[in-house]
Image (tube, grey):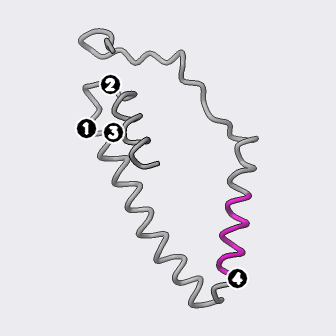
């Protein structure tokens, strides 16, 4: 999955912002993994593993249900041209 997302970002982002976009994506991804591990470890330490897994499962269900209220955005009509002309693939 990570390789697919990295590849799609490299193909989607305009050349002039590609490196910055990938660096921000990776910083948020790996920073969130580290902070999430600390947070879930604290929840596990305070309430136990079973409770932690049940809360995580509930949050995943809520995340899946949120697509109805916050749908994915259609980017097919987005202007992705760069300052030096359209992208040729």
Distance from the alpha carbon under mark 1 to that under mark 2: 10 Å
Residue 88 got which mark?
A: none
Q: Which residues are magenta?
A: 51-61
Where 45 falls versus 19 (above or below)?
below
Disc on the earlier residue, 4 or 2: 2
Q: Is residue 6 above or below residue 39?
A: above
Task: Give the alpha-carbon distance from disc 4 to disc 1, as whole Å.
Answer: 40 Å
Q: Going 73% across and 66% down the picture, which residue do you hit? A: 58
Q: CA distance from mark 3 to mark 4?
A: 37 Å
Q: Which residue is mark 1?
A: 19
Helix, strand or loop for the magenta stretch, by majority: helix
Circle 4/circle 1 CB separation < 8 Å: no
The quarter of the picture where the C terminus appears is: top left
Residue at the disc numbered 4:
51
Check whether the beta carbons of the residues at disc 2 and disc 3 lie within 8 A of each other. no
Determine the secondary structure under disc 1.
Answer: helix
Q: Earlier in the sequence, mark 1 or mark 2?
A: 2
**Sequence-wise first label, 3 or 4:** 3
Residue position for label 3: 21
Query: Does residue 38 appear to the left or right of 84 in the view shown?
Result: right
| Mark 3 secondary-structure assignment | helix
Q: Quadrant of residue 72?
A: top right
Q: Do the CB atoms of the residues marked 3 and 4 lie less than 8 Å apart? A: no
């Amino acid at each position: 999955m990570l390789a697919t997302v990295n590849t799609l970002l490299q193909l989607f982002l305009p050349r002039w912002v590609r490196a910055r976009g990938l660096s921000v994506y990776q910083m948020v991804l790996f920073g969130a993994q580290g902070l999430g591990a600390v947070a879930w470890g604290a929840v596990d330490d305070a309430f136990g593993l079973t409770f932690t897994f049940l809360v995580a499962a509930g949050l995943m269900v809520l995340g899946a249900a949120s697509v109805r209220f916050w749908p994915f955005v259609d980017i097919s009509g987005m202007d992705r041209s760069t300052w030096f002309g359209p992208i040729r693939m």
